[in-house]
Image (cartoon, rainbow, N blue to C red):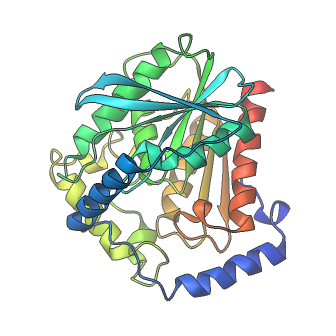
Amino acid sequence: MNIDPMTIFERSEIASAHRLNRILAYLPRYHTGRRPNARLLNALIGIGQKFAPSVQSKDVSLSAFQITVPSGKREVRLLRPPAPGSAIFLHFHGGAWVLGNARLDDRWNASIASKADVTVAAPDFHLATDDHLDRTIDDAVAVTEWILDHLDQLGAKTLFIGGESSGAHLAACSLVRLAARRPLNGLCGFLSFCGAFDMAGSDSLKQADGRSLILDAPSALRNLERLTATLPAGAVHSPEVSPYLADLSGMPPALFIGGALDPIRDDSQKIYDRWAGCNGNATILIVPEAPHGFERLPTRLADKTLAYACEWMKKVAYA
């Protein structure tokens, strides 16, 4: 189902986002293909988090534990609302596979927990600044399997999985790989914000130029080329790496949210078409005046998009 954005957003809200985009057009873009950028930012994030207290929410409790994944021990952060329902949302953070950590998303995940009445599980994983995307995917698969196998221990019955940008890719890869070898008991939904699902680069990315907002599109394409160069020949065209190519039969309901100005907007459309074709249970919302990562911008479009996603989760999980 394609959602008409005009049933959600007011014209004045779209116009306001357009005005913000005119300002963003004058700001530098982030070059995801430059590894020194990611290493420096990760170091600064680590230093800042070492001395700064965690973001606290009066309505959402925060705890953390460690699990063992192929790259070693990794932290999983749990954010619970006052009266959590029976679902967990496993959220993989974005950052072009090379940047960030789960703690950076505490405020965002607390908002989702509160609005959707779900417990959010946010894991860390191998950051592919070494260009070993396989290690990153392996960690994501291991985290997903651990959460699926410990739903009862975590006080849940069902699982949503998803993420933003590269995080949505890791979530989709995890489902494709696990579905090939085991039942995905307890899985109830998939949620993607500006997801990347074609690691060869979709047409919208290849045709974009340096004028794309927030994200430098040519550098983003070079990032994909770097990350996939270490994989076996032809792997980039396999469903295990580019999940839009997978047989998605039997997958749960999915919501794909993309931005009309996002250079990887085609990724959302392609996996939506595949998911809907296999199951008939997918929904897509392409938000006007929305660049990559728009869901984090201070706009009514972002607020309403998050509210829509949370209501969708509540409907799917608790209907």
Residue 303 showing in the rendered view: yes
Q: Where does residue 171 sit, x and y in percent of width and height?
A: 45, 38
Tell me the quadrant of the picture where the C terminus can be found.
top right
Residue 1 showing in the rendered view: no
Q: Classify residue 233 as left or right of residue 261.
A: left
Q: Where does residue 18 sit, x and y in percent of width and height?
A: 68, 81
Residue at the extreme top: 152
| Residue 139 higher or lower than 30, as above or below | above
For the point 68% across and 84% down, which residue is it? 19
Using the image as rendered, state which of residue 114 and residue 273 is in the foreground: 114
Q: Quadrant of residue 217?
A: bottom left
Picture mark count? 0
Q: Where does residue 86 sit, x and y in percent of width and height?
A: 68, 20
Q: Classify residue 117 as left or right of residue 240.
A: right
Q: Where does residue 270 sit, x and y in percent of width and height?
A: 51, 54
For the point 75% across and 49% down, which residue is it? 308
Q: Quadrant of residue 44?
A: bottom left
Using the image as rendered, state which of residue 22 and residue 268 is in the foreground: 22
For the point 60% across and 81% down, which residue is it? 21
For the point 58% across and 18% down, which residue is it? 186
